[in-house]
Image: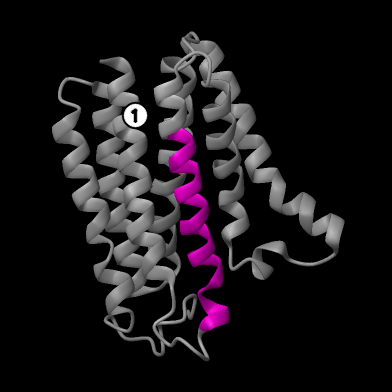
Amino acid sequence: MRAYCERGDAGFWAEPVNALTNAAFLVAAGLAARRARGDGPVLALAAVTFVVGIGSFLFHTLANRWSMLADVIPIAVFIYGYFALAMARFFDLRPLAATAITMAFAALSFGLSPALDALTGRSVSALTNGSIDYVPAVLALLGVGLALLKRAPGTARSVLVTAGLFLVSLTFRTADLGLCPRLPLGTHFLWHVLNAVVLYRLLIAAARFRA
């Protein structure tokens, strides 16, 4: 399974940089947990961040179907878990309303790629190296940030900066395979490092808002 530029064979350490940069998620999780003592939801998402790092490490070493699931499922849990927390904490929505909006966001997210495939007649996922799946998360961050500008300007700025960083991170993820001829190492490892910063910033934004 060659999903990334760095992988040249089926060996366990065929992607050493991609594999080892997942340590950034473990560091982000630990730092966020330390800053968010007593904040149950943020601590839970910090634990998910830790699992993201483990799952991604497994995928970049074992590179098989089950390790791919170990990679993508924790990421999805973080995205929708954080979205639900943002709805409840930033906008003071009740659990039922926050859950309903999160479910609607999830439905739109899962429906985006098939809709674009049908519209273009091509696999948008293949064209974007799978990055299309993260576009709804970028848009959600931008939407949350803009909606918070009057309600909580400091948090809004933090979320918007994080959205910009996430977009840069996603660009490196998208460019990886296309740069193989000129950059054998690829750029996917930068997705790991920057994304770890993104998750940390999001967790701290939620923790500070509560405080």
- Residue assigned mark 1: 205
Disc 1 element: helix
Closest to the observer: 133 or 58? 133
Residue 8 belongs to magenta span: no
**Residue at image coords 55%, 42%:** 137
* Residue 78 x %, y %: 40, 40
Q: Is residue 51 left or right of residue 36?
A: right
**Residue at image coords 74%, 53%:** 114
Q: Quadrant of residue 124?
A: bottom right
What is the magenta segment's predominant secondary structure? helix
Indicate whether 46 appears above or below 205: below
Inspect this view and state whether residue 85 appears: no
Q: Is residue 118 left or right of residue 159?
A: right
**Residue at image coords 55%, 67%:** 174
* Residue 128 x %, y %: 63, 66
Indicate whether 50 appears above or below 96: below
Inspect this view and state whether residue 11 appears: yes
Tell me the magenta residue range.
159-179
Q: Quadrant of residue 12?
A: bottom left
Q: Amino acid at mark 1?
A: Ala
* Residue 62 x %, y %: 33, 73
Count neighbours of disc 1 (C-alpha within 10 A) and say few if under 14, some if 14 to 19, many if 20 or more: many
**Residue at image coords 22%, 60%:** 23
The way the protein has been coloured in the rendering is one colour
* Residue 61 x %, y %: 31, 74
Indicate whether 184 appears above or below 132: below
Residue 173 belongs to magenta span: yes
Q: Is residue 33 left or right of residue 76?
A: left
Indicate whether 92 appears above or below 76: above
Q: Is residue 33 left or right of residue 97?
A: left
Image quadrant containing the C terminus: top left
Q: Quadrant of residue 10?
A: bottom left
